[in-house]
Amino acid sequence: MQPLLSDIKVLDLSRVLAGPWATQILADLGADVIKVERPGRGDDTRAWGPPFLKNAAGEDTEDGAYFVATNRGKRSITLDLQSPEGQALVKSLCAEVDVVVENYKVGTLARLGLDYATLSRINPRLVYCSVTGFGQTGPRAAEPAYDFLIQAMGGLMSVTGERDDRPGGGPQKVGVPIVDLSTGVYAALGIVAALLRRTQTGRGEYVDVAMLDVQVGLLANQAMNFLLGKRVPRRTGTAHPNIQPQRTFHCADGDIVLVVGNDGQFATLCEVIGRPELATDPAYATNGKRVRNQAELDPILDAVFAAQPRAHWLARLKEAGVPAGSINAVDEVFEDPQVRHRGMLRHLPHPVAGEVPQVMNPLRFGEATLRVDRAPPVLGQHTEEVLASLGLSAEQIGDYRRRNII
C-alpha cells in the first residue's frame, strides 16, 4: 500500500509548533517535506529542553523533545533566507514543489520576495499556506502570538478550570498547546483541500490560517451555549455544561471519570449504584432536568461513589456498558492495552540516537498506509542531497557552506 500523498512535495519554511505540526501530518501521509532551517541554529524548538534526545552513548543531543515531537518524516536543510543566494534557492525549490508552508510575521516574506504573489508566478500550481496568530488582515495582524496568549484571548481559559468558589478555582490553560496543534490540523486540512481543487482547476491556492480564528471556532458548543442561551459560559471544573452526570467522581481510593451521554445510560447507572429510583425521579429523568438540578444530584452521587474503591466501580460500570475510566498519567497511557494495540507508540531508526520514540499519527486507512520510516532529522542532514537535486555541484555547495548561506 502507498501513502496517500506520496506524489506531493512540500517546502516547510515554518518553525516552532503550528506550522511544523501541519507539515508533520503531511509527511505522515506520505508527502516529501523539506524543512528549511537557519544555519547553525535550526528551529527554535531544537533548543527547548530538557529533556533532549540522547545519543547512543546516553548523552544529550541538540534536539529537544518539542522538536522531536513535531518533525517526523521530514528532510532538513539549512538555508539563510536573508541572503540573495538563499532566496534564489528557495525560488528554485518552489518551481518543483506542490506546497509551501510558512509562519513568519505578516509581510516578512514579501520583503524577501518569497511571498505567495511572487512564488505563484514561478509556479502557478503552488499551494501556499501562511500560519499566523491573527491572520493576514485585521488590526492585530502584525502582532506575534503564542498558544497561551490565544487560549486566553479566544475564550478557552474562561471555560477551563474549577469554579471560582471552589478550591483551586480560576482560569487554567489546557495541558498541551491545543491551539497550536489544532491550527496545524486545520492548516493541513486546508492544504489537502486546495490540492484537491487543483486537480480540477490546475491552479494553486493561498491558505490563510490564524490561531485566534481556530480558537474561536473551537469554542463550539460553548459558543452556541452563549449565542442561544444569552448567558456567558463559566468554568465548571470537570463537569460538562450540557450533559450530566459527566464529571470526575471521588472514590474511596482515588478518582474516576464518569461519562453518561443519554437517559438510557443514566437509568443503567442508577441500577449499578443501587439507586434505581433516581432514573424515574421527575427531577432527574431527562438530561435537561439533570443539568438544571445538578446541584441536588451531585451530592447524592458523590456519597455513593465515595463508599467504594475505583476498581469496584470501574468493573461494575464496564460490565453494564456505562462509559467510565481512570485518570491516567502519561506513562499509564502508553501501557494501556488499547493504545498498545493501535500502535500509537513506535520507535524509528535515528542516525545519532540509534532510535527515537514517536507518538504516531492517529489516521488509519483501509487501502493506504502512513509513512513511518523517517525519524525527525538532524539539523541540515539533507542539505547536500536536496541542493544536489537542484543541480548544484559539490564545489558550489562547499562555497555556500563556507559563506554560511547553508
Image (spheres, rainbow, N blue to C red):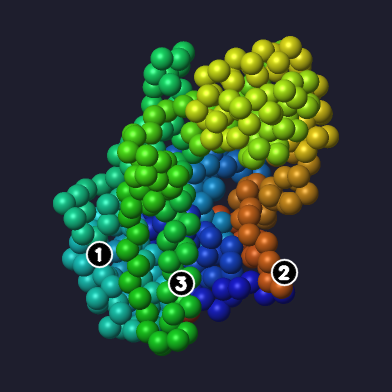
What amino acid type is highlighted by mark number 2?
Gly
Instruction: Answer whether labels 3 and 1 touch (C-beta < 8 Å).
Output: no
Asked if residue 348 lies left or right of residue 53, the reply is right
Q: What x and y, as percent, mark residue 196?
A: 48, 78
Q: In this view, does 204 lie above or below 380?
A: below
Crowding near the residue tagged with mark 1, few <14, some 14–19, many ≥20 C-alpha atoms within 10 Å: some
Q: Which of marks 2 and 3 is nearer the N terminus?
A: 3
Res. 317 in view: yes
Cα distance between the residues tagged 3 and 1: 24 Å
Q: Is residue 209 above or below residue 321?
A: below
Cα distance between the residues tagged 1 and 2: 40 Å
Q: Going by the picture, which residue comes out furthest to the left?
A: 139
Crowding near the residue tagged with mark 2, few <14, some 14–19, many ≥20 C-alpha atoms within 10 Å: few
Q: In this orientation, which residue lies closer to the viewer: 209 or 360?
A: 209
Residue marked by disc 1: 109
Question: Any mark on residue 156, and which?
Answer: none
Residue at x 70% of width, y 39% of height: 264
Callout 3: SS: helix
Residue marked by disc 3: 193
Question: Any mark on residue 366, and which?
Answer: 2
Asked if residue 99 lies left or right of residue 288, the reply is left
Q: Earlier in the sequence, mark 1 or mark 2?
A: 1
Asked if residue 347 lies left or right of residue 299, the reply is right
What amino acid type is highlighted by mark number 1?
Leu
Callout 2: SS: loop
Q: Is residue 111 above or below residue 71?
A: below
Q: In which quarter of the image is the N terminus?
A: bottom right
What amino acid type is highlighted by mark number 3?
Ala
Cα distance between the residues tagged 2 and 3: 21 Å
